[in-house]
Amino acid sequence: MLRIALLALALLGLAAAQGTVAGPQVNLEFWTISLQPFFTDYVNGMVAAYARAHPDVRVRWVDVQFAAVEQKLLAALAGGLAPDVVNLNTEMVLRMAEQGLLVDMDAAVPPAARQRYFQGLWNSLRYRGRTYGLPWYVAPNILAYNAGLYRRAGLDPLQPPATEEQVIAHARTIKDRTGVYGFMPNVDGIRLLHRFQEHGLPILSADGKRAVFNSPAHVAYLARYVQLFRQDYFPEDTLRRGYLGATERYSAGQLGILATGPQFLLRVKQDNPEVYAQTLVAPYPRGRGNVIHLPTMAIAVPRASRQQQAAVAFGLFVTNDENQLAFSRLTVILPSTRAAAAHPFFKQGGATAEERARVVAAAELPYARDLTVVVPQAADLYRVFREAIESAFFGKMSPKEALDWAVRQWTARL
């Protein structure tokens, strides 16, 4: 009887040990930015699908508000409680990479897997020649324009502007003939840094130690818009409120052309169905640099993760073709992978403005890159640049004086 009892205890111990082995061996914490509640089902479904394919991995999902994510991540890293996989934008990725906090994806991701992303988007996440994030979802700019205002101005709504020069010409005509502002160009604050690069104009020297955005070409570009502003061809809130102000003015029927991400069309649809019904879309004009600024959301893995290999594998799953395509079907975003973007879903138009915008934006992806300028003391340098640009627009300095001053300030800090 004693032998039988001991044997039974031994078998129970073996069963318990086998149960432990069969259970999850890897626990990952996955942070996203502001995806709840609208995409809760999508993310939960993706996590569940990964668990079915990888029964040894358990993923805990945490959603964080955009304004808090960077500070919360730094606090978690300092406290030894870092997430394993985290959603960041390009600027955050490069800032974290500068501090040596993220896994090098060029080393962690096989070449075949790297090839599936658009090269420009993969390169957007580079710091000193290495990539520190996986491109996730993106939203290229498109042109939305009010066909009713076009007709009032004597312009053909079926002939949208194809170049920046034509955008300016159409905006002038709309203002001159209707009294309504034609556009609110993306030249406020640091967005002018993106515009410079879209026109092939550099921001920093090759070694990153000097600012170089005060060449005659840079000055001429800024001077053009300063002149348009002083001639009242775009409103003052362009410089104060940027995208938000432009979207509100367009929604109110008080703007002819809106350069925006296609997701903002949903805001127009909600705020003013009549203006939305008059909205047509066209490609965002490419400048001489043949590149379009495209804010990119990415997936990164902190070096503090104890499960780096499993975390990278999960990040590749989140950003694979199938999951990106499924996400794009739910809202007006676009994928960062070539195969997903080539799907017929992105080639078929539709009755709505956002459906047409999806087709237009997808065609822009080969030319897209996140042009965020990441520099040490970025907050201070951005503040200097904004002050310089506003000084030029409001007549406190000439465009040349403003850019010369900003370059001196940047170079002293770099």
Image (cartoon, grey):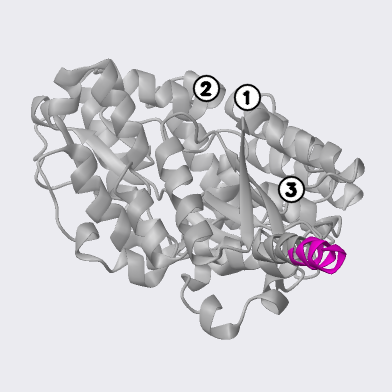
Position of the N terminus by quadrant: bottom right
Upstream in sequence: badge 1 or badge 3 = 3
Residue identified by numbered label 3: 83
411 and 363: which is toward the camera: 363
Upstream in sequence: badge 1 or badge 2 = 2
What residue is shown at x 70% (from left), y 43% (from top)?
Answer: 403
On screen, residue 44 above or below 277:
below
Crowdedness near tag 3: few (<14), some (14–19) or many (≥20) residues, C-alpha within 10 Å: many
Question: What amino acid is labelled 2 in the image?
Answer: Arg
Bounds of the magenta segment = 1-11
203 and 71: which is toward the camera: 71
Q: Nearer the viewer, mark 2 or mark 3?
A: 3
Residue identified by numbered label 1: 395
174 and 110: which is toward the camera: 110
Cα separation between marks 1 and 2: 19 Å
Q: Residue furthest bottom?
A: 111
* Numbered tag placed on residue 54 in the rendering: none
* Numbered tag placed on residue 241 in the rendering: 2
